[in-house]
């Protein structure tokens, strides 16, 4: 990804001011190029880019429903395969790219994703993870981190917010034994670009989860998306790694992690957390980090 | 040229409500949204391009001198460029009415 | 030269799909359509059908995969029944509003609860409003012929709408019947390759699935409705071409011994053939009764229905689905709706029967007709009648 390359997710879209997801999509699209077909789930990116009769997309793009992105992508991949085989159309290098948010991927779309990965379709799935159902107004998903306040897991007298730990979808994807799984963050753009490129080159299914900081939902200033994304990585809240044919590799491996409080205190969605709760989160991060390092040995 | 939605008749709708003009949403002047605007002290700029890399709108372009500046037609004034610039070239100022 | 073979109807539908040279098949098993997808798997595995076979993980994904493959211009087929059709409910709306020419065979089956794998029309009635072209077949030959016609109709540029071919679960799907299969060459002449106008293609990018704010949603829906209504012209045209080529002509509404009758019995699907036996018996006994069947369920053939029914005094409708707490028989209510504007119209008496695989014999049809005529004369304190329920 050179800095000069063409914008494929063009300005004029209706994402919030300072949207980390729009940035992540923009970065990914620069690497993806023009020879793609994008399948998009219902969600922020779909809504901000496709209001009838306009479109922000300059590549072929289809949105249908919320939970079926991976299934539609499967159909497209199969269609392209057979059209090419029958000599009707040369589709050999067209990459099928499915895009969905965390709600569309980890929750309602999990079945379709699992099916598509299991059937080994040649496609890549990018989950743009802003850690809640942001498009409908910040409701919790299974990707919402422990302790985050959302409208359906609000912090209150009897609640610390989200009461479960973030579902580990990269591990679920890796458990399907697919060639490539990765996590990325727009703050580490070179790493993101490399991973998108690698995923494109896989002949088979690939899954990337890109942390997409949402100033609106995470309650931080509009200029903060990159900074908070960087902190997510540097504190171990969102580690950057790859799983290539089952082999784990950390792509960001510092001597020591920054304390999670740096990350938590930068966002309004964690504002209510006590020292004890933040301590719990630190413990969990330490545990998961150790596990990850072990897998990557 | 895509007709605005409040002028579309049912006969204007393409089959399956397909949008056939790629990138037509670029008519949308998102610059109207902003309450702050980037200003530049280009003497400090080392042309690293990080501002362009990190702009969610993708509206930062190189000018004739090779310096990066936001296209105010689209710039929403988020301030990411100002925050991430390693040389502190950019200052966000209140948008005058 | 057409080949005459004895074959189970489900298998015959798959053979028709093979002759149509489908490109992509999304497959999920559900009784009683499973033989369709099983046979297609066999055909693909043996190299007899060059298609991508996607064994999806649910019917919702089956129809979703069909959206994808149809959107890139591939000839697409799937089959389902009962609960499967319900599971893909939201997706079938999208197939029609996005104007994707998918063909689906539905082996009509009752809906849970209680669980019933046996046939009735509940699954069909739940998808009346979704915007697909829907054709009912009564026997194996019709199933084969209309599967071929379905692709031709769906993919026609004047139409570009998905088509459901309804065959009664078990009562038709599992029957072995003598069938005439056309020559592959003749099928190729009848069915040109799919040529979808705006496929997803990097050479000519389009965006499919924009959202519509209130200011434009109505226009999008009206555009869809006009096209669904207009598709009837092409359907009639295709049926005529099919008839000219293969010798079997299909009409939106079919009648049997309906000339000079004062009572009409109305059925849909394979039970029509049983009803014909009852009609014959009643005619012999001197009753002026005829049978009236709808083949083209959607777009609804208002003209043909009114033309056929207007001169009868009584129209007795057999519904094999029940609209609970409402109209009872959905087809009966649509008949009333269609006939209402006529100055002269029959009294419509609705019967719900044959639910969950319950058979209706020719003698049962006679009972229904007699009771229907009685109700038409004397009225009833019920909005609709249930046939065959054990009371004590």
Image: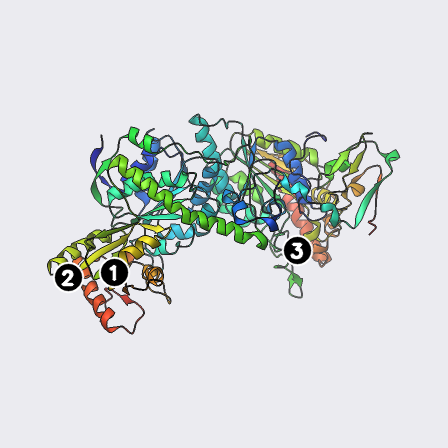
Classify mark 1: residues with Cα within 10 Å, few (<14), some (14-19) or many (20+): some
- Name the mark on residue C366: none
Q: In the image, B96: left or right of C348? A: right
Provide the secondary structure element on which disc 2 rests. Answer: loop
Q: Position of residue C241 (x, y in %)?
A: 31, 37
The C terminus of chain C lies in quadrant: bottom left
Residue labelled with disc 1: C311
Q: Position of residue C61 (x, y in %)?
A: 45, 45
Front in this rendered view, residue A59 or A207: A59
In front of the other: label 1 or label 3? 1
Classify mark 3: residues with Cα within 10 Å, few (<14), some (14-19) or many (20+): many
Q: In the image, B75: left or right of A117? A: right
Distance in Å between CA atoms under marks 1 and 3? 72 Å
User: In this rendering, do the residues under marks 2 and 1 share a single chain?
Assistant: yes
Please, is residue A115 above or below residue C19 in the view?
A: below
Which mark sits nearer the N-terminus, 2 or 1?
Answer: 2
Distance in Å between CA atoms under marks 2 and 3? 78 Å
């Amino acid at each position: 990804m050179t800095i000069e390359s063409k914008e494929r997710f063009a300005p004029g879209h209706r994402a919030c001011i300072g949207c980390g997801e729009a940035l992540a999509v923009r970065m990914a699209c620069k690497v993806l190029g023009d020879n793609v077909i994008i399948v998009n789930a219902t969600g922020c990116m779909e809504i901000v880019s496709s209001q009838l009769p306009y479109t922000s997309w300059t590549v072929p793009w289809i949105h249908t429903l919320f939970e079926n992105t991976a299934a539609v992508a499967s159909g497209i991949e199969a269609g392209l395969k057979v059209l090419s085989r029958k000599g009707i159309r040369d589709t050999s290098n067209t990459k099928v790219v499915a895009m969905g948010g965390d709600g569309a991927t980890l929750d309602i779309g999990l079945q379709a994703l699992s099916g598509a990965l299991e059937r080994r379709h040649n496609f890549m799935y990018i989950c743009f993870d802003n850690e809640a159902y942001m498009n409908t107004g910040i409701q919790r998903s299974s990707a919402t981190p422990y302790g985050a306040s959302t409208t359906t897991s609000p912090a209150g007298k009897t609640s610390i917010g989200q009461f479960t730990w973030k579902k580990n979808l990269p591990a679920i994807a890796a458990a399907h034994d697919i060639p490539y799984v990765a996590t990325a963050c727009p703050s580490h753009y070179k790493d993101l670009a490399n991973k998108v490129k690698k995923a494109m080159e896989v002949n088979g299914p690939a899954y990337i989860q890109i942390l997409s900081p949402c100033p609106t939902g995470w309650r931080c200033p509009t200029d903060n998306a990159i900074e908070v994304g960087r902190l997510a990585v540097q504190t171990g809240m969102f580690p950057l790694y790859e799983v290539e044919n089952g082999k784990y590799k950390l792509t960001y491996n510092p001597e020591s992690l920054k304390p999670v409080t740096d990350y938590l205190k930068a966002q309004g969605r964690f504002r209510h957390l006590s020292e004890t709760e933040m301590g719990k989160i630190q413990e969990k991060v330490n545990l998961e980090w150790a596990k990850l390092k072990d897998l990557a040995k | 040229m895509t007709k605005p939605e409040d002028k579309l008749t049912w006969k204007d709708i393409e089959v399956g409500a397909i949008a056939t003009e790629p990138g037509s949403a670029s008519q949308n002047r998102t610059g109207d949204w902003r309450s702050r605007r980037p200003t530049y002290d280009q003497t400090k700029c080392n042309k690293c391009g990080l501002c362009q890399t990190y702009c969610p709108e993708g509206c930062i372009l190189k000018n004739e001198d090779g310096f990066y500046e936001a296209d105010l037609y689209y710039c929403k004034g988020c301030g990411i460029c100002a925050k991430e610039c390693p040389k502190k070239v950019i200052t966000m100022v209140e948008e005058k009415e | 030269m057409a080949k005459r073979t004895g074959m189970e109807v489900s298998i015959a539908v798959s053979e028709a799909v093979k002759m149509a040279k489908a490109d992509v098949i999304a497959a999920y098993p559900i009784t009683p359509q499973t033989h369709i997808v099983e046979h297609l798997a066999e055909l693909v595995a043996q190299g007899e059908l060059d298609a991508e076979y996607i064994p999806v993980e649910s019917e919702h994904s089956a129809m979703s995969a069909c959206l994808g493959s149809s959107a890139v211009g591939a000839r697409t087929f799937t089959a389902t029944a009962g609960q499967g059709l319900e599971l893909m409910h939201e997706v079938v709306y999208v197939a029609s509003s996005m104007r994707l020419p998918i063909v689906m065979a539905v082996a009509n089956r009752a809906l849970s609860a209680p669980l019933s794998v046996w046939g009735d029309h509940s699954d069909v009635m739940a998808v009346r409003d979704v915007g697909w072209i829907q054709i009912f077949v009564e026997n194996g030959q019709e199933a084969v012929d209309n599967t071929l016609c379905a692709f031709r109709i769906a993919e026609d540029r004047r139409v570009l709408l998905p088509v459901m071919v309804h065959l009664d679960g078990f009562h038709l799907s599992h029957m072995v019947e003598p069938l005439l299969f056309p020559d592959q060459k003749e099928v190729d002449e009848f069915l040109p390759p799919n040529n979808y106008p705006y496929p997803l293609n990097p050479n000519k990018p389009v965006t499919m699935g924009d959202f519509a704010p209130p200011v434009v949603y109505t226009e999008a829906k009206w555009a869809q409705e006009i096209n669904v209504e207009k598709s009837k012209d092409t359907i009639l045209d295709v049926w005529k071409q099919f008839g000219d080529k293969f010798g079997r002509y299909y009409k939106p509404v079919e009648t049997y011994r309906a000339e000079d009758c004062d009572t009409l019995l109305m059925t849909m699907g394979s039970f029509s053939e049983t009803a014909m036996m009852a009609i014959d018996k009643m005619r012999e006994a001197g009753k002026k009764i005829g049978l009236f069947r709808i083949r083209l369920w959607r777009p609804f053939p208002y003209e043909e229905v009114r033309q056929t029914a207007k001169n009868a005094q009584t129209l007795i409708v057999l519904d094999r689905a029940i609209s609970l707490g409402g109209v009872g028989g959905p087809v009966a209510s649509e008949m009333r709706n269609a006939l209402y504007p006529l100055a002269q119209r029959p009294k419509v008496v609705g019967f719900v029967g044959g639910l969950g695989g319950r058979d209706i014999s020719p003698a049962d049809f006679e009972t229904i007709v007699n009771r229907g005529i009685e109700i038409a004369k004397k009225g009833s304190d019920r909005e609709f009648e249930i046939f065959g329920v054990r009371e004590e």
